[in-house]
Image (spheres, rainbow, N blue to C red):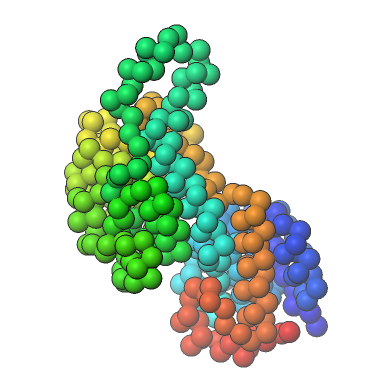
Amino acid sequence: MRPKILVVFKIKSKPLEMLKKHCDVDVSLYPSKEELLSIIDRYDALIVSPLNKVDGEIIERASNLKVISTHSAGYDHIDIEAATKKGIYVTKVSGVLSEAVAEFAVGLMIALLRKIAYSDKFIRKGKWDSHRTVWGWYNKIETVYGKKVGILGMGAIGKAIARRVKALGTEVFYWSRTRKEDIEKEVNAKWLPIDDVLKQSDIVVLALPATPETYHIINEERLKLLEGKYLINIGRGSLVDEKALIKALKGGKLKGFATDVYEREPLQESELFEMEWKTVLTPHHAGLAIEAMEDMGVQAVKNLLMLLRGEIPEGLVNRDVLKIRPIEELKML
């Protein structure tokens, strides 16, 4: 009997066809929680996106579920503890989004320092009345070239950012839980404790996942260390205490802030909207690119198929699950 797989978002055709060669596949686009609860017990595996929340109640109802493969690098939309207790393997993708997200991070950085987003709004509103008006901005616009860039989080995305900003003529500092000798040699990046990265850098980029340890890693105290500097968030909204951030921006302490992620999403109103000169805001789509979406889908499918063949993919999130359900018990292909 072929494994039964449920895909709950609009996956690209190439990975979907790969999956159909080996499994019976149903696609239900963004079902409600009630809809998912009513059908989840029919399936051996689930492929989800960050828009599909898989909580403890859904996992408890999933009597036959063996694998949850997420079409993302982050996995905070899945109750990992509940999945592990039930013997469900959870996988993520890695690497495939790194180039797209890193490119976007650098785009945010350049847009913020060179006021590209502000200038676009300025000209569309018909405010360009003279060259003199625009030339008056000269002492408020800066280049990325020559800056010291600090990166918190040196995984695949952090490394891809480091390579790009080094090519722009910057000095790179970073913090991660472990030293990354490869990137240190490649771009001469220097590891420092978190607070020292904030003190030494002109621009700080957040490229960390959402975990209990990283929650509000940029808080009111650390924002004081960023006085006169720029902050870019490409990780998760929970990394930054937004109330403290807005206070720092309004008080002129933080020079500028660009972000693709927020504590509450979707964001439809915020005091950040009022600060067009000091902010660049995008709606959590740094990884959205045709190439990245297809690559990510392929890896999500490969992770799933590997597990169903009794093999452990690099993207396995909850390795403790091996103690609950041996990998041999997943073999269906």
Q: Residue at x 34, y 72 (%)?
A: 181
Percent x, y of residue 294: 67, 58
Query: Nearest the camera: 101 or 235?
Result: 101
Percent x, y of residue 211: 38, 62
Indicate the quadrant containing the C terminus: top left, top right, bottom left or bottom right. bottom right
Indicate the quadrant containing the N terminus: top left, top right, bottom left or bottom right. bottom right
Q: 185 left or right of 64?
A: left
Q: Residue furthest top?
A: 129
27 w.r.t. 317: above or below: above
> Can the viewer see residue 172?
yes
Q: How many marks?
A: 0
Query: Nearest the camera: 192 or 331?
Result: 192
Query: Nearest the camera: 45 or 251?
Result: 251
Q: 242 left or right of 321?
A: left
Query: Where on the picture, by quarter, is residue 147?
Result: top left
Q: Residue at x 45, y 30 (%)?
A: 116
Percent x, y of residue 231: 33, 44
> Can the viewer see residue 273?
no
Percent x, y of residue 40: 67, 67
43 w.r.t. 274: above or below: below
Query: Where on the picture, by quarter, is residue 115?
Result: top left
Q: Residue at x 39, y 36 (%)?
A: 112
98 w.r.t. 316: above or below: above
Q: Residue at x 26, y 64 (%)?
A: 191
